[in-house]
Image (cartoon, helix red, strand yellow):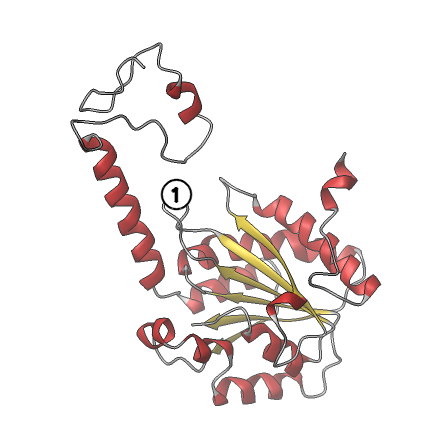
Amino acid sequence: MTGLSRADGVVGERDPWLRLRGLTPARIGLGHSGGSVPTAAHLAFQLAHARARDAVHDRMDAAAVADSLRAVGADVIILQSAASDRATYLQRPDLGRSLDAPSRDRLASAMEGRAAGDVCLVVADGLSAQAAQRHGPPLVGALLPRLAEEGWRIGPTAVVQHGRVAIGDEIGEVCRASLVAVLIGERPGLSSPDSLGIYVTWSPGVGRRDSDRNCISNVRPDGLPPDLAADRLLFILTEARRRRLTGVGLKDDSRLLRE
């Protein structure tokens, strides 16, 4: 293959990998320099790895996320998991699955005298605060008008610092919501440090299993754009309410509606 052995990683015009690399962010056809990859490819890998590590350790600006959500019409409450800081969150996954006592009390007080909603939304940092900050508000902004048009009763939108997926179970339980959708930063990949995941659970409550959830992943402009993600999320929410379940028993057939 022409040019694959060049140390700078540049390939010749006849190299078939040239076209393929334009179709995927995956590291394919890197070539070699002696027994190693070219310097440019090695440095690019180190940069991607550093960005992934930074995404895991970055702290979400919850106030800024809340402001962005209010700007798109969300009723926001800021909460905190039982993990007091980022280091504890990474070392103790269990603490990220539940609210700290002040947050639970604050949420319970906010729900006093308020009717239960059909769905409540949670935006949590997860393992990528970048994903929550960049893609959470646009996704909620795309979803809220769709929900309102369909007559959904929407509960509060919780912004959670140091949260895991299962924290939505407790939030949904306190809010007495039929459904909870957790928008959370996914574990960073070497080509996607800002990927957002969505986890939907029917009848949320502490003790729910992962098999009780539906997931939409890779929400980001270079993956599944927030606007399309909102369409898929609305489909899952609608089917979950109609069938009164989520998880392994509910399949995402939203693509069939567009074919």
- Residue 7, percent across and down? 17, 24
Taking the spot 43% from the left edge, 51% from the top edge, the residue there is: 194
Q: Nearer the viewer, residue 176 or 47?
A: 47
Identify whether 64 is placed above or below 13.
below
Taking the spot 21% from the left edge, 38% from the top edge, the residue there is: 43
The furthest residue to the front: 35
Identify whether 48 is placed above or below 130.
above
Q: Quick check: 228 left or right of 184?
A: right
Taking the spot 18% from the left edge, 31% from the top edge, the residue there is: 35
Q: Quick check: 140 left or right of 21?
A: right
- Residue 156, percent across and down? 63, 72
- Residue 110, percent across and down? 62, 84
Q: Nearer the viewer, residue 225 or 56?
A: 56
For disc 1, the neighbor class at 10 Å (few under 14, some 14 to 19, many from 20) is: some
Taking the spot 44% from the left edge, 80% from the top edge, the residue there is: 95
The furthest residue to the top: 14
Q: Secondary structure at mark 1?
A: loop
Location of mark 1 (residue): 191
Residue type marked 1: Ser
Location of residue 171 (image quadrant)? bottom right
**Number of labelled discs?**
1
Location of residue 106 (image quadrant)? bottom right
- Residue 92, percent across and down? 38, 77
Identify whether 22 is placed above or below 122.
above
- Quadrant (top left/top right/bottom left/bottom right) for the C terminus: top right
- Quadrant (top left/top right/bottom left/bottom right) for the N terminus: top left
